[in-house]
Amino acid sequence: MHKVRCFECGADVEDPLLDSCPKCGGLLTIEMDLDAAAGIRPYDLRKRPLGVWRYAPFLPVDASKAISLQEGGTPLYDCQNLVGKMGIKRLHVKYEGANPTGSFKDRGMTVGVSRALELGCGTVGCASTGNTSASLAAYAAKGGLRCVVLLPSGKVAAGKLAQAMFYGAKVVMVDGNFDDALAVVKQLARERELYLLNSVNPYRPEGQKTVAFEIVDQLNFEVPDRVILPVGNAANIWAVYKAFKEWRSLGWIDRIPMLTGIQAAGSAPIVEAFRSGKRDFVPEEHPETVATAIRIGNPASGRKALRAIFDTKGYAESVTDEEILAAQKLLGRSEGVGVEPASAASIAGLLKLVDSGIVSRDEKVVCICTGNVLKDPDTVMHSCEGILKAKPTAKDVRRVIS
Ligand code: F0G
């Protein structure tokens, strides 16, 4: 059992097709009834394999009818090589690139598309910087639904675009940025053209909560001091916060990590708000960054993100494109973990915050790396050393590699 509530005024919202509060226009959130979970012991969950549906008592859809591609259950890497280079005690990377479509979006989409089917919707849609569209297209295919995705023209990484096309979505390039595309798809949803599966749909963050559950589960119920993640449209940091809050309310954990959001310097409205101590933000009109996944100036869930950051005594920081690309390579070349630029923002942010003393060297940190390196091959090709050329002889190969 669960209720849909307004995040701002607390009103119950009955119409399942709304994306905001009919009374005050606020964001929606889901209030889970945790009574059923209260009878479970945390380790009992382990009867199911690690993954999103291990945490079914915390999810607002019927698990027996879920549209699933076996999402979640991603590795939590203990980054022994990187801690040496960074001078910190412990760092884990939660590698969300190992999800079925290569990003954390699959966690929310299994729940969101299952919800669309519960409601009897025939068409689902989203605006996306790429990953949401790739994920929705795959889950819509699995669920037998029509899928429409709106993308910002020319700013979607090749891997993501290919996925959305491949899984059979109707792919529409909008002459504008993500924020423009989101406004259009919301209107289409209001006109009942499609069921909206952006993360303003409160069912999406419910699935995304499971990344936090898995981190705690994989650390044998030891809670990290800090969790760092990239912030774009700003729902994921909220989802992580909500997960920790739910487990704390059951007494399964005794504290919530300091949630730390990282944005790209050219699209950092949440960081600006954080710096001025405000719980609301001023949109950035011309967002720009190499990390196209988080090239968002008007984050739909920005107010939720700020609550997550302030309530956990966390932090928000921005990183430059150069810092992002350097961190991406550092992670790949010291740990063998390949992430896309937006995901590397969390590592770049950690480096910066260790340098500035905000993160102390004995903190236990988990960085969530949200998407796979293969999502954006063009950026890798541009940022890495050139390819060597040789004649087909051992002698010539020896010459060029020496
Ligand atoms: N990392 C990656 C790889 C993403 O694709 C996104 C968001 C984020 C981080 C930020 O998460 O929006 O919850 O703060 N991508 C969305 C998309 C916007 O359309 O794929 P957030």
Image (cartoon, helix red, strand yellow):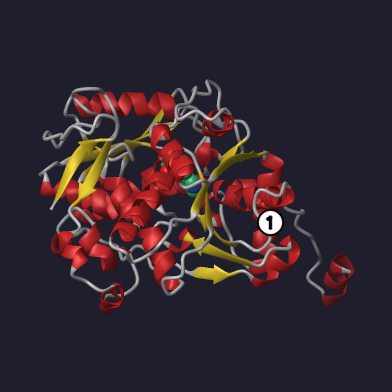
Q: Amino acid at mark 1?
A: Lys
Residue 88 % position (x, y): 69, 63
Residue 281 % position (x, y): 48, 26
Q: Quadrant of residue 66?
A: bottom left
Horizontal arrangement in the rendering, residue 233 relative to residue 83 (left or right): left
Horizontal arrangement in the rendering, residue 50 relative to residue 291 (left or right): left
Q: Could you tell me which residue is drawn at 53 percent across and 30 percent down?
A: 277
Q: Which quadrant of the frame does ligand 1 lie within?
A: top left
Secondary structure, mark 1, is helix
Does the image show residue 381?
Answer: no
Pointer 1 local density, CA inside 10 Å: few below 14, some 14–19, many at least 20: many
| Depth check, front residue: 185 or 355 | 355
Q: Could you tell me which residue is drawn at 21 percent across and 34 percent down?
A: 194
Does the image show residue 209?
Answer: yes
Name the image quarter holding the C terminus. bottom right
Residue 357 % position (x, y): 71, 50
